[in-house]
Amino acid sequence: MRKMLFTAAIVLAAASMLCASGTDESDALTVYAYDSFSGDWGPGGTLIPEFKEKTGIDVNLVSAGDALEMLSRIELEGEDTEADVILGVTDDFAYRAYPYLEPYSSPLIEDIPEELLFDPEDRLLPFDYGAFAFVWDSECGLEKPQSLSDLTKPGYKDKVILIDPRTSSVGLGLLLWTYNIYGDGWHSWWEAMKENALTIADGWSSAYGLFTEGEAPIVLSYTTSPVYHVMNDDTTRYQALVFPEGHEATIEGIGIVRGTDKREEAEEFIDFMLTDGQLPTAIANSMYPVNASIGLPDAFDYAPKPDRMFRSGATSPEKTEELLEEWISIMAR
Amino acid sequence: MPGNRGYCIRHALPGIAVLTILFLIPLAATFSYAFRDEAKALIGIIRDGYTYRLLSFTLTQSLLSALIAVAAALPFAAFFARYSFPGRKAVMTLSALSFTIPTILVVLGFVIWYGNNGILNTLLMKFLHRDYTMLRVLYSFKAIILAHVYLNFPVAFLLITEAWMGLPDTAENAAYTLGASRMKAFLSVTLPRLRGGIASAFILIFLFCFSSFSIILVLGGNPAYSTFETEIYRKVHISVDREGAAALSVFALCVTAILMAAAGLGVRQKRAERHRRTLRKAEGGKIAEAIIMMLLMLLFLLPPILSILYRAFFTKDGAFTLRAWDDIAGKGFGMASTALEGIMCSFAIAAAVSILSIIIGLRIAEASAKCSPRLLPAISSLPMAAGSVTLGLGFSFISALIPVKSDLISCILVAAAHLVIVLPFSVRTMTPGARAIPERITQAAYTLGASAGKARRKAELPLLAPYIRKAAAFSFALSLGEVNATLTLSDGRISTIPVLIYRMISSYNYQGAAALGTILLAMALIIFAIGEYGGKDNGIS
């Protein structure tokens, strides 16, 4: 038994060496970011060394789960948090982060379009944004839907894959989207879609998987989704549908944690993210840069920017909860 | 050895301690939310009619799934536990594979195979010359049950076969001699003694389906098919209502606890005489029967898995490509060694977890065989009964308490979380074995002057070896496929294969994910093969 325990300990130690992918911590600037920012594939992998080279500041990038888990962590840690900067709070949950942040009115705000500046007090500054959209297979033989209402037509029965707002932020985006377009009439859109949707998946991953397997030609995703198919599959077959009614947008913000002793370094990091960091982040996250002067690669031509956008954060948390409850009573009861 | 309190406490203690630290404390902390403000949230849940709708659907689908999985597994277990034939072990090994795959790939495998545009339908349309989808299985209640049975059939099959093989056939032979028919012998002699094994399998499957929700939402195709877990998930991740989530978890846990207690009371364990069944060699008609049995099982279990393999090499349009493999080898994503690192990392964690789960699980199994037979397995199943979202809440609580500083700590935390998750399986796999050890063997060892430790090592453990191997393989496979706890606890420091699979998918690379899934399956296959073939065969009597 001892021998086995010993073996287990050795194996664990070996595991920790094999699995290591973290960075060394010292008195570096600690940045909390969501999981997909750091890691080998996120923009963090290239941006952090670049920042260090430029400013000489060490960054300790902590990936704190998804955006919501990151927020929970800041809330749980409170005053004791090691974080100096948090990166990736979306505008709809920004209200939860505000109590822990201090304002920073960066000079670079000038380059950001006004409608993207969701926090009037500059505690969170936007660094990228995206919009939800339906992506469709243009070779499916169906008529191209021209509006959100078109999807409720009988011709699209079992042709649309939706996502559940109870289990996915993308799904929640669609719920708010329909509310922003139809107001109180949003019920009837969902009632019609209850029939027309092939399925209402639990998350974006499974929904998009069903779509690429050809189970249905229309799926809820992002305006930027076609970029992947252009870059990786060299096809323009999959296109994002831009509807004249407008699209639900989600904006990601970055902010300085209250009480940090590295205010200057934190400011430098934010400024870096709003300049040199813009393009790599936009490409890796498949979002649009907030700095309008940034040129994007050609593939982004297939990621049409909607003319009209609704900010998810503009719907109050209480209203969102109310909508969810109603949604359940329409769809699930 | 009833009444031997000290023995029991000593044996159960390490397991209980691990569970307390890793699970019960964070759980209690989470649950305390439910009782804030004079349990307002809990009372709200109890009063809400929607809770009972969720309850009725959750119970319906999980009872049905567990019943069908067990019923489907019984005839196969009956055959595999009595006869030996070529291919027997290979099929047993393959049957356990579906156990390893992360949910998202199971869903994909199902869609590729059973989907309206899936392989099965394409084949049917081609051969029957029809131009419409013939088999609409997915996106209905049937699909939920089908997927749950698919995932849990191996659990039922392997656990029941193992339990059955532990039953000597002397009693049945006596029944035959007394003129009982085969059916009668089965119902009145075999089944009562199998009840423990069947109940174990049933409870595990029931709990597994109780907390399932991804499969239910995607394959069910209708939001009316929602379980408690959907609602808990929503309260945690979307509505940020910790009180409500905790209250619902408490409610769900109470329901499962009542059901498990009822199941435990219904099964009175009788100590079986230890005389492991010797397999009869299948001959003549039995060979034909064996072939049919094996074919049926493989036809059910393999296609969704093979679909994943297929997708790793072929595009949706059927063109052969090695691009996915280039991607994970580093040409596509600039992640040169990551796939390899992921493999080694997954392997090392799974190995550690499987060893630890044997050490701790074995003690719990032994203690529960010798002392209070019902309580301990129930306690060790608690993490499963609490559901994955609740577990995740507990883990994020731990990770906030221990601000992770090093890879070693991340690794230990992840391994510990996996341990809590696999423990119910390893305990339930080994308990029937531990129960079947006749006291007289241990006592004979004492008489011959062996110390307690030596008696355990030399007499009891060899008898348990096949159960231990099976439990180890199960634990290994489960740890290999685990993704939620790994993500929550590792701070992004640890990239196991399932974590990489999810990252692949979030960058739209489903083919790369299928390729990684193939690697995962290959690893699991090797481990299960060791579990089946490794070690001497069990001709102990």
Image: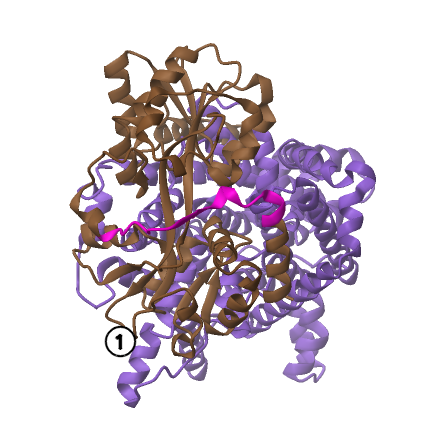
Residue A59 vertical position relative to residue A301 in the rendered view, above or below? above
The image shows residue A171 at horizontal and vertical percentages of 48, 54
Q: Which residues are magenta?
A: A302-320
- The quadrant the N terminus of chain A occupies is top right
Camera-side residue: B474 or A235?
Answer: A235
* Chain coloured brown here: A
Q: Residue lying at the far bottom in this picture: please name it.
A: B129
Residue occupying image coordinates x 19% and y 53%: A230
Which amino acid does the dot numbered 1 rest on?
A: Gly
| A313 magenta-colored | yes
Residue B119 vertical position relative to residue A61 in the rendered view, above or below? below
**Mark 1 surroundings within 10 Å by alpha-carbon count, few (fewer than 14), some (14 through 19), many (20 or more):** few
Camera-side residue: B380 or A178?
Answer: A178
The image shows residue B171 at horizontal and vertical percentages of 68, 70
Q: Is residue B88 visible?
A: no
| The image quarter in which residue B242 lies | top right
The residue to which callout 1 is attached is A141
- In the image, B32: left or right of A262? right
- The quadrant the C terminus of chain A occupies is bottom right
* Chain coloured purple here: B
The image shows residue B215 at horizontal and vertical percentages of 50, 61
